[in-house]
Amino acid sequence: MRQRSLALLLLLRLRLWLFAVAASPALLGVLAADLNKEPFTIRISCGSFDDVHTAPTNTLWYRDFGYTGGRFANATRPSYIIPPLKTLRYFPLSDGPENCYYINNVPNGHYQVRLFFALVADPNLDSEPIFDVSVEGTLFSSLLSGWSSDDEMTFAEALVFVQDSSLSICFHSTGHGDPSILSIEVLQIDDNAYKFGPLWGNGTVLRTAKRLTCGSGKPAFDEDLNGIHWGGDRFWLGLKTLSSSSDDQPVSTENVIAETLLAPNFYPQSMYQSAIMGTDRQPSLSFEMDVTPNKNYSVWLHFAEIENGITAEEQRVFDVIINGDIAFKDIDIVRMTGERFTALVLNKTIAVSGTTLKITLQPVEGTRAIVSAIEVFEIIPAEMKTLTQEVTALRTLKGSLGLPLRFGWNGDPCVPQQHPWSGVDCQFDDTKMHWVIDGLGLDNQGLGGVIPIDVSKLQHLESINFSGNSIKGNIPFTLGTISGLRVLDLSYNKLNGSIPESLGQLTSLQTLNLNGNGLSGRVPASLGGRPLHRVRFNFTDNAGLCGIPGLHECGPHISVAAKIGMAFGVLLAFLFLVVFAACWWKRRQNIIRGQKLAAAREAPYAKSRTQFTRDVQMAKHHRPHESSRGSNNESSPHLLS
Ligand SMILES: *[C@@H]1O[C@H](CO)[C@@H](O)[C@H](O)[C@H]1NC(C)=O
Ligand SMILES: *[C@@H]1O[C@H](CO)[C@@H](O)[C@H](O)[C@H]1NC(C)=O
Ligand SMILES: *[C@@H]1O[C@H](CO)[C@@H](O)[C@H](O)[C@H]1NC(C)=O
Ligand SMILES: *[C@@H]1O[C@H](CO)[C@@H](O)[C@H](O)[C@H]1NC(C)=O
Ligand SMILES: *[C@@H]1O[C@H](CO)[C@@H](O)[C@H](O)[C@H]1NC(C)=O
Ligand SMILES: *[C@@H]1O[C@H](CO)[C@@H](O)[C@H](O)[C@H]1NC(C)=O
Ligand SMILES: *[C@@H]1O[C@H](CO)[C@@H](O)[C@H](O)[C@H]1NC(C)=O
């Protein structure tokens, strides 16, 4: 690390002063490539329809993109230091409590993400919104009331690792006004920037809590201090005194300061050309700031010996005491850097239990403390995200059920834990090290649409309540694969079709409410027996449903075999009728022929006629008798079944 820094410094000097020395060409090549590479940078001017270039550095801000909702508006033009942009994007609560910017195609690496906030320029809206901000699912900033009139509070900044080529930045409503965003900056920094110790890395997000440059009263960005882009264009608040009550004094120099602009943090030289120093009357320095209690903080202190009177070791020696504990003992800048006008950077991780962080530089007898700059970061454990396939399934569900805009459902469903999606219950899965969805409570939300087949990708669901909506279509058979499902309440919807047999596989099921739908067909036998196992279910108010006590009798249960049998029976009956009709017809022909013969033999016309009538009547009596017997016994298909 140190060696690399020295090499870089050397290279810088080579580049700056155009020294031609015999350096290893290979080494030079590698390092030059490193430094020449520009960091990945995206700046967005929220609410703007056009790209914007701002003075004095001609910084490019892209027109607004990547947002999930909201409206654009003109931004107020406050007096404090913010980028001179004219528009903003704000997110009314009707667009949902969570709204995000998704920035894709971001090379994996280490980034400084900075957001500036502003107020909507509208005389009717005078309230200052209070909201939370997260990056990659980790909540890192909660705006405090009064932010809109305080330089340092008009922006939020976090250092974060991008690991999946995309970055999500979300704004969470707290019910106090509409989050309003002026600008978003995504600035790549060195992979090892601000490496403070073992907690550092992709499991941690650093929030910039304080960054101040001492002795110059002017706030400045790295850019103003002739920094380089890998420094992330940090914002430095300028202080002339560390506290209004103390007796300290600013000092400055024009001398070149060595060991600046070094990897990984690339601090600009100007930062070290001014400082705050103790006085003879009060040789110590102290700085105090409000912090959130019970958090860890990473404190970075910057020094350079710039006082003309100090020329050797032991002329200035001091301890650094943070919240009462000695953080660094016997700091002697000249001894530690080996030279005057050379930068010294120290960092310390501090667990703070109270609400203040107090840094005291306590010099030994006869010397005075000095400090060039102070940085304080809150160390925030990064949230684990929700299992990707479950997020995808929820998005499908959102579309399929036509979830109203007010739900939001942007960003990650489960994190930040303070702002999960409404209607979604989450659980942390230790084995997968991801959040999973174990409950969906979307009852009485005026939903329509259908339940997608993909709902079964939410394999960790234990409870589903979609009761009291207008959901149409079938109950997806895939629900039968969510093996841990205990509660399934789809009552009072417009579901139709039959209850899938697969629901019988849900061995954990305790409550099944399907009442008040348009379901039809037989309740699967595998479910019908469940009440015995203390499963509570309700199938009432489904006109077409049958087959268990309390519902109407099903028509007979018709299996495929039965259907074949039935068809066969109908055919048989038909054949029987044909044969019967043929016999009857034949018999009648015989009778008629017999009578004709008899009539021909026995001449008297009248008698023959009487005989004929009687015979016909006999035949008439005979026929109904026979036919009714046949129909009773064999020919009705209805009885065969
Ligand atoms: C913003 O301000 C400009 C004038 O500077 C005005 O023309 C425009 O209508 C305003 N836009 C909105 C959304 O209020
Ligand atoms: C921060 O301090 C730790 C030890 O306290 C040290 O190992 C590390 O190198 C320092 N980081 C930088 C970038 O100076
Ligand atoms: C996070 O960092 C750890 C070690 O610091 C590494 O093993 C792991 O692969 C990183 N995770 C990702 C997703 O890059
Ligand atoms: C602070 O850091 C320690 C380890 O150094 C860790 O055990 C503790 O959980 C951290 N506290 C917070 C609030 O992150
Ligand atoms: C589902 O939601 C409805 C309406 O809010 C409620 O009455 C019902 O008890 C819930 N179902 C279950 C199984 O908790
Ligand atoms: C269910 O309702 C839809 C219309 O919502 C209709 O298209 C479909 O045919 C119905 N299915 C059954 C089995 O009744
Ligand atoms: C089932 O639902 C109906 C309304 O659809 C209700 O009247 C009845 O009490 C419910 N039965 C049980 C056992 O909960």
Image (cartoon, rainbow, N blue to C red):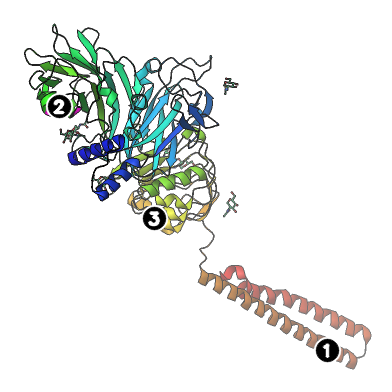
Figure quadrant of the C terminus = bottom right
Q: What element carries label 1?
A: helix
User: Mark 3: which amino acid?
Assistant: Thr
Q: How far apart are marks 2 and 3 (CA)?
A: 71 Å
Eye-nearest disc, 1 or 3: 3
**Residue pointed to by mark 2:** 339
Query: Mark 1 packing: few (<14 Cα in 10 Å), some, or many (20+)?
Result: few
Q: Distance between the residues labelled 1 and 3?
A: 76 Å
Q: Does the magenta stretch include residue 423?
A: no
Q: What element carries label 3?
A: helix
Q: How many marks?
A: 3
Figure quadrant of the N terminus = top left
Q: Which residue is drawn at 47% across and 40% down?
A: 467
527 w.r.t. 332: above or below: below
Q: Does the magenta stretch include residue 339?
A: yes
Q: In the image, which residues are magenta?
A: 336-345
Eye-nearest disc, 1 or 2: 2
Q: Which label's residue is closer to the chain start, 1 or 3?
A: 3
Query: Mark 2 packing: few (<14 Cα in 10 Å), some, or many (20+)?
Result: some
Q: Is residue 635 left or right of residue 139?
A: right
Residue 8 visible here: yes
**Residue pointed to by mark 3:** 481
Q: Which of 142 and 224 is in front in this view?
A: 224
Which corner quadrant of the image does residue 287 belong to?
Answer: top left
Q: Residue at x 13, y 17 (%)?
A: 310
Q: How far apart are marks 1 and 2 (CA)?
A: 144 Å
Residue 167 in the image, given as x and y percentages of width and height: 39, 39
